[in-house]
Image (cartoon, grey):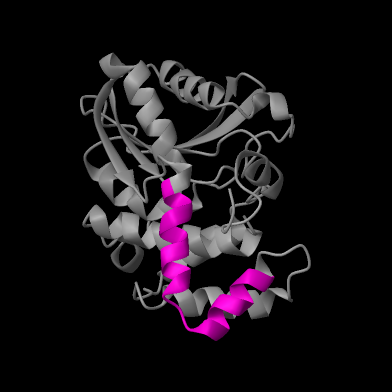
Amino acid sequence: MYKTFYYLMSRLLNILCLSLLAFSAYAEYPVVTADKELMVPVEGGNVYVRLNGVTHADSIPVVFIHGGPGGTHNGFVGMTELADERMVIMYDQLDSGKSDQPNDPINWRVERFVESLDAIRKHLKVERWHLVGHSWGSAIALEYTAKYPQHTVSTVLGGTFISTPHWIMDANLLVNAAPQKIQDTLKECESSQPPEAPVCNAAYIKLYSAYYTPVKPNEAIISYEENVGGNGFNPVSYTHLTLPTIYSV
């Protein structure tokens, strides 16, 4: 899929995920700095992990699994509000964000992503935890839950990605309902010679604006996203693991 599509879709699904969880962290909770940061060794390299609420040793922690592939934990930082009662775990998957970025296709296997998540659990000495997966992260959460039910208390899914054919079908339904001018622009954006990014951005915003109302993040979260560091979104791993366009299989 085209990178602009990913960016805007990820922003939309972040909003939907937060709404489904009945949280309003973007509007109300400015504390987004980590209590602890560490790098955890996994197959292929080291992944960045951040913790909040580390003093709540008696409560079952929650881990947030970001989308992509190639996304980052940044969209979840508002969830630190939960750290008043339990440890909140966020991480960047290998090849994205603040984690190592070997960009080796041998690492881009679902089972390796699942085992990396369990490596984090073992490193933190967590016996059981809640999983929250978003988009691609929901696929990892489902696979993890199936393989490690003994370590999974609950699994919460947002913007669930399970079936590629259904994903394509749903995307095309949205596009076909848009004005013809928007449809034509979107097809150009998914072509081998897309227009400039602002043209595609405007078309995607027009497409999605009928289905959600944007909320303004607080200044602390904006600052975090601007200064978090790392390599951010990785289009290489994303393209390798997804389809070249939203219109074809």
Instruction: Give the quarter of the image for residue 195.
Output: bottom right
Q: Nearer the viewer, residue 227 or 116?
A: 116
- Left or right placement of residue 180 versus residue 144 in this view: right
Residue most toward the right? 193
Q: Nearer the viewer, residue 182 or 110?
A: 182
Residue 12 is a magenta residue: no
Range covered by the magenta-colored residues:
166-188
What is the magenta segment's predominant secondary structure?
helix
Q: In x, y percent, where is residue 179?
A: 48, 84
Question: Which quadrant, please, contains the N terminus?
Answer: bottom right
Instruction: Give the quarter of the image for residue 183.
Output: bottom right
- Left or right placement of residue 9 versus residue 155 in this view: right
Q: In x, y percent, where is residue 123?
A: 46, 18
Q: In x, y percent, where is residue 160?
A: 37, 46
Would residue 94 be seen by someone viewing this image from the given angle? yes
Q: Nearer the viewer, residue 100 or 160?
A: 160
Residue plotted at (37% across, 51% down): 159
Residue plotted at (43% across, 15% down): 122
Q: How many numbered circles are shown? A: 0
177 above or below 33?
below
Residue plotted at (71% across, 44% down): 236
Q: In x, y percent, where is residue 153?
A: 22, 26
Q: Nearer the viewer, residue 21 or 90?
A: 21
Would residue 32 be seen by someone viewing this image from the given angle? no
164 above or below 175?
above
